[in-house]
Amino acid sequence: MSRQLEIGGVPDCIRLDGWWLESCAAETADDMRPKREAGARVSRLRDPKALGVVAALVLLADWLFWRKTPGISVALFVMVLSVAILAMREKRTTWKEWCGALAFQWVCNLPVIELLQPLSLLFSAAGLIGLAVWAFYGRLVEGRQMAWLMMRVSTIGATLLPKTVIEDVQPAQIKMGLKQRLNALALPVGIGGVFLVLLTAANPVLEQFLTQFTHVEFVSELEVFRMVFWVVCACVLWPYLHLNQAWIGGMPTRPKAKAVPVSWGSALVNADSVRNSLFLFNGLFLIQTIMDLGVLSGGVALPDGMTYAGYAHRGAYPLVATAILAGVFAITTRSMVQGDRILRTLMYLWLGQNLFLVVTAAFRLSLYVDVYSLTYLRLAAFIWMGLVFVGISLILFQISHAKSVGWLVRGNLVALSATLYLCCFVNFAWVIADYNLNSKENLHQLDTYYICELGDFALPAIRAFEGDRQTQLCTWYTAQSPRHTLIEDWRDWGLRKWRLQVYLAG
């Protein structure tokens, strides 16, 4: 008996005659492509943990912020989001890292707990970005990495969720799933509708209930905006929970500096020109210092028509600008000054005179404030002069200890951040009102309109002044105060608001 040889596993295109070379390759590729793609990418949309965390955060945001005045609720939400970031990061977080990260977030959100204002929100957002950077890179990074991640999260990251939904939900799957669901609902909806009509005809109570139910507005305009709020929250939160290199990209490297020939620069800025400049600058600043000492001590009379208030106002800000230019010159010529003892001595002398000029500028401003009272802008000028003084002091330390420019920049950023952080806890409205009310003996010299417009947080100083003088300073204001600081819900609670409310209640 004859048998026909059969080889199992041979494709039909080989077994049959005709065009097998072309069709076989296409068939094999078609069979292998879905398996390879399915194994290569697993969507995070199918991860119940990720979806649950995002849904919980959206519900929390709705409960805390929808049609509510924000306050301590911002700090609470940021802390919960920080826990979610640490829990969803790809690398396991140790208990020491948990404690350090949450302590860092607590410090960054203390200004929000004190009072919700733009400056405190800035520190809260900076803390959240810093935590995301650490969660992704796994260590402290430089400013360019933090800026890179911040830009990616706020731009590409906000579109990550819609893009993932579009990529994962295929049109064929939508059609097939919709058809199956319609087939499954056709029988119960049809027969159930018949039963509902019959029961309604037999039960007038049910008929009345259904009549009222059909007049209910299911989706109002407010609910539409609420759904948009949910979608926006989900899109904003999604990138923080999916910090991976697929959409963030690699760590940006430091750009390589290329030597650019500047023949004209070397001709202008050299050891001789720097030495001559320092001699000239020291002479000019010495003349200014002697004149300031003479005027402020009373030994030198001012020109005709010039008052001390005008003298103080005229010199406060230009002297600060002079000190800033001096710092820029010192940084630019640091390499030439570092190796020359004479130039270094001249630089120390000149920067020392700049420090003295900053002090005299602050003294001039204080004289002006004594005459024309304190304002927000003048108080900010005092703080700015203090930062300039610290900056010049850091330049002196940098030159004497041969520190780098990066060290100087980091030192100034730390000083600036620390100053702004402390400013979050200062009630400047009370400071200004208390100073102005206690520095004038004559009531007619007070700018009562400005004092009364300082806001609710100036009320303790205003009430104390009114009690001491037995007069009513802000008649139109105190009748309706406080206007914006009443705590109506725990979500808008703030420590400064609470202190004011306790004071007014007492």
Image (cartoon, rainbow, N blue to C red):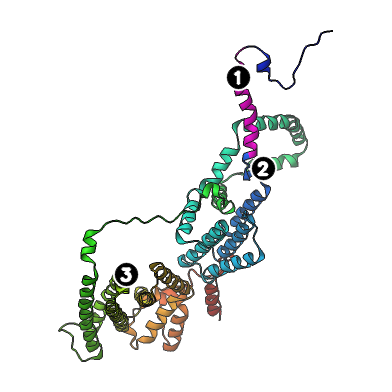
The alpha-carbon separation of the residues under discs 2 and 3 comes to: 82 Å
Q: Quadrant of residue 361?
A: bottom left
The residue that disc 1 covers is 23
The residue that disc 3 covers is 335
Residue with the most extreme top position:
1
Q: Position of residue 431 (x, y in %)?
A: 42, 80
Q: Position of residue 494 (x, y in %)?
A: 55, 70
> What residue range appears in magenta?
18-39
Q: Nearer the viewer, residue 221 or 491?
A: 491
Q: Quadrant of residue 388?
A: bottom left
**Mark toward the start of the polypeptide (2 vs 3):** 2
Q: Look at the numbered discs 1 and 2 and tell me whether their residues touch, using CB distance below 8 Å.
A: no
Q: Position of residue 373 (x, y in %)?
A: 33, 80
The residue that disc 2 covers is 213
Graded by Cα atoms within 10 Å as few (under 14), some (14 to 19) or many (20 or more), the crowding at tag 1 reads: few
Q: Nearer the viewer, residue 439 or 271?
A: 271
- What residue is at 21 percent from the left and 74 percent from the top? 277
